[in-house]
Image (cartoon, rainbow, N blue to C red):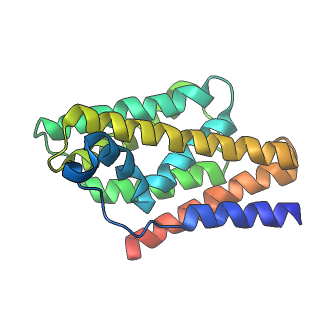
Amino acid sequence: MKFRSLFLAAGLVLASSPAFAHLNPAEHGSFATGISHPLFGLDHILVMVAVGLWAFQNGGRSVWLIPSAFVATMLAGFGLSMAGVPLPFVEPAIMASVVALGLLVAMAVRLPVIPSAAIVSVFALFHGHAHGAEIGTADELSYAAGFALATALLHASGIAIGWGVGSALGADTQKGRLVVRSLGAVTAVLGLSLFVG
C-alpha cells in the first residue's frame, strides 16, 4: 500500500503542468520572473527532476556534480542567447532531453561522474538558450539568478524524491530501485508525448 501511494503521488507531481503564463518582469521583478520560468514548463520540470533522480542513482560525488554541471552549462547557454549566438533545434533538443534523462533513470545507467556531467551539460545548453529567448524585458543578471536557483531546487527535489523512496522502501532494495526507475519511465513517456502533443 505504501509503495502504491508513493508511486501515485510522485507520478502526479511529475505529470502536473502549471496552467499559467510566464510572469511579467514589470509587475513581478526580474528575479521572480527567472524563478518562475523553469516552473511553468512541463519539459523543464521533468528534466530538472530527472537530473536529480539520476544524480541520486549514481551516488557519491555525482549527487552534487551532475546538477552543478547542468546549472553551469545552462547559464552558458543563456549567455550564448544573450550574445545573439544562434543554437539550432532548441525545442526538439529540449523535448529529447526529457526522453533521454527519463531513460537514463529508467535503465539506472551508471557512468563515471565526468561523462555523466557531460551528458547533462549538452542538454543544459539548450535549456539555457531557451530561457534566454524568453527573457522579455527582464534584467539579465537577476533573471539568470532566478532560473538558476529554481533549477537547482528542482534538481534537489529529484534527489529528495530518491532519498524519500530510499527511506520508505530502501534505496538498495529491489522495490526501492523499481520505484525510482519507474519514475524515469514515466518521465520518458511524458517526454514522448511532448513530441506528438
At 66% from the left and 58% from the top, the residue drawn is 183
**Foreground pick, 101 / 107:** 101
Quadrant of residue 9 in the image? Answer: bottom right
Q: Position of residue 87 (x, y in %)?
A: 20, 46
Q: Is residue 50 left or right of residue 29?
A: right
Name the residue at the left extreme.
Answer: 84
Quadrant of the snapshot with the N terminus:
bottom right
Quadrant of the snapshot with the C terminus:
bottom left
Q: Is residue 16 visible?
A: yes
Q: Is residue 132 left or right of residue 195?
A: left
Q: Where is residue 14 in the image (x, y as percent from the top left)?
A: 58, 61
Q: Is residue 40 left or right of residue 103?
A: left
Q: Position of residue 103 (x, y in %)?
A: 58, 54
Quadrant of residue 123 in the image? Answer: top left
At 52% from the left and 40% from the top, the residue drawn is 153
At 70% from the left and 59% from the top, the residue drawn is 182
Name the residue at the bottom extreme.
Answer: 197
Q: Is residue 134 visible?
A: no
From this view, report whether residue 186 is shown above or below residue 37: below
From this view, report whether residue 83 is shown above or below residue 169: above
At 65% from the left and 65% from the top, the residue drawn is 11
Q: Position of residue 46 (x, y in %)?
A: 50, 55
Name the residue at the top extreme.
Answer: 61
